[in-house]
Image (spheres, rainbow, N blue to C red):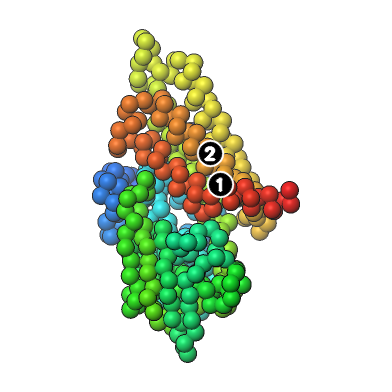
């Protein structure tokens, strides 16, 4: 019998029957509305616009957000959001997960730091699937080093005049707003602000980055700001204190990526086991060869370790005591686990795993964006050592 996706999941003492009912509700929707079409959408490089309100209706966008803005936060812990990411990852198409989750890296800061008028304008529209929002921080000349960004916002009465560009912006082609890091003051981190820029303002333009290694179903863009006149009511937080806004959501963003990577690793394991039990070589199933069994054991060992570490980091965050260093190291572990499992699954599947349309082939290509996005492995290691003063 093939390995069941759920049996590959380490027992989690924090999950309740309510969590599992939530999982089943999501799975029914995903199995009906997404999985049958996922490969075609990935090849086409776009998800149908009508999927967003459907996903909103089942609650995919709403977990963890205040009810005042259309969210589902009352009585729900972090595991409900983790389950959303796990079930999306089960599809095995990273671009779909990225597209349907991109609001999670920008909307939290809007709902925490924006004026109430702006929260009411943006929150319900995004959580209902009617509009979209993206985070615009990375520039052609400044990636993870936010303090070096050069996009400027000059004060002009009740407006900011924004000039510059952003690139590698997930969801950028169809976003209605950009949470944009800009320079309003002197050089360095102390001169950075974050402004929410409506995409329909005069002077905003965008071009697609569609020659990507992976995440094809998720649009990626370069955004240009040419003398864009933005009302100051769209400032998030305090002028020149934008670094705090940018850092606000990093722990949850990285945990979301970690959950994805751990779940993608389990997809690779499941695909490998199923194939090994069906494929015969030298008169017996692949799964009866010791070298293949050892690969499967090594995959499961690394997945179990990542799951246990994730449970610990999530518990700490739930208790209001997040360990930034551990989350950084866990992200590295999760990306290395995904890379190992994708490689070993590819070896087990052989030629069939090399063909387009295979989950393993796709995830093998998508390892790198997971290892870079949200903070590269190198930056995560450096962050961890600084936290522990090594």
Q: Nearer the viewer, residue 3 or 234?
A: 234
Looking at the rendered image, the quarter that the N terminus falls into is: top left
Q: Which residue is mark 2?
A: 336
Identify the residue at image location x=35%, y=21%.
Answer: 278
Dividing the picture into quadrants, the one containing residue 135 is bottom left
Q: Secondary structure at mark 1?
A: helix
Circle 1 packing at 10 Å, graded few (<14), some (14-19), many (20+), is: many
Residue 389 in sight here: yes
Image position of 220 with respect to 365: above or below: below
Figure disc tally: 2
**Of marks 1 and 2, which one's residue comes earlier in the chain?**
2
Residue 316 on image: x %, y % = 65, 52
Q: Distance from label 1 to label 2 (Cα)?
A: 9 Å
Q: Residue furthest top?
A: 283
* Residue ID for mark 1: 377
Q: Residues within 10 Å of mark 2 (few under 14, many from 20)?
A: many
Which residue shows up at 48% across the image and 37% down it? Answer: 339
Q: Nearer the viewer, residue 211 or 93?
A: 211
> In this rendering, which labeled residue sits more in front, label 1 or label 2?
1
Decide if residue 17 is on the left or right side of residue 210: right
Q: Residue at x 41, y 68 (%)?
A: 165
Q: Establish if 349 lies above or below 100.
A: above
Residue 4 visible in the current orientation = no
Q: Which x, y percent locates residue 354?
A: 33, 31
Residue at (60, 40) in percent of width and height: 308
Q: Do the residues bearing badges 1 and 2 touch, measured as CB atoms within 8 Å?
A: yes
Could you tell me residue 377's position as x and y percent? Answer: 56, 46
Relative image position of residue 293 (x, y in whole percent): 49, 20
> Outermost residue toward the bottom?
157
Secondary structure of residue under mark 2: helix
Which disc is residue 76 wearing?
none
């Amino acid at each position: 019998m093939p390995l069941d996706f759920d049996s590959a999941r380490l027992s989690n003492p924090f999950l309740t029957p309510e969590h599992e009912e939530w999982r089943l509700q999501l799975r029914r929707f995903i199995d009906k509305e997404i999985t049958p079409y996922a490969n075609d959408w990935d090849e086409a490089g776009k998800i149908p616009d009508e999927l967003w309100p459907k996903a909103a209706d089942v609650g995919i966008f709403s977990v963890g957000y205040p009810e005042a803005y259309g969210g589902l936060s009352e009585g729900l812990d972090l595991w409900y959001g983790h389950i959303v990411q796990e079930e999306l990852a089960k599809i095995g198409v990273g671009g779909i997960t990225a597209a349907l989750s991109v609001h999670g890296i920008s909307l939290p800061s809007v709902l925490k730091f924006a004026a109430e008028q702006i929260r009411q304008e943006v929150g319900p529209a995004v959580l209902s699937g009617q509009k979209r929002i993206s985070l615009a921080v990375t520039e052609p000349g400044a990636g993870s080093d936010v303090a070096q960004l050069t996009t400027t916002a000059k004060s002009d009465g009740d407006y900011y005049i924004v000039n510059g560009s952003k690139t590698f912006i997930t969801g950028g082609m169809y976003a209605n707003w950009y949470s944009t890091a800009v320079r309003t003051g002197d050089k360095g981190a102390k001169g950075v602000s974050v402004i929410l820029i409506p995409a329909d303002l005069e002077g905003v333009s965008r071009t697609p980055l569609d020659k990507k290694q992976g995440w094809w179903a998720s649009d990626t863009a370069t955004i240009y700001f040419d003398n864009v006149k933005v009302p100051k009511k769209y400032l998030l937080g305090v002028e020149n204190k934008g670094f705090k806004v940018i850092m606000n959501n990093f722990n949850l963003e990285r945990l979301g990526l970690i959950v994805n990577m751990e779940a993608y690793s389990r997809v690779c394991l499941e695909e490998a086991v199923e194939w090994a039990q069906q494929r015969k070589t030298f008169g017996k199933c692949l799964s009866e060869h010791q070298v293949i069994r050892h690969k499967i054991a090594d995959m499961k060992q690394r997945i179990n370790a990542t799951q246990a570490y994730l449970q610990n980091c999530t518990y700490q965050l739930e208790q209001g005591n997040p360990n930034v260093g551990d989350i950084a190291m866990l992200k590295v572990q999760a990306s290395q686990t995904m890379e190992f499992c994708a490689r070993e699954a590819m070896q087990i599947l052989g030629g069939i795993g090399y063909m387009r349309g295979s989950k393993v082939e796709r995830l093998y290509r998508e390892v790198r964006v997971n290892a870079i996005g949200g903070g590269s492995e190198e930056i995560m290691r450096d962050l961890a050592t600084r936290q522990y003063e090594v």
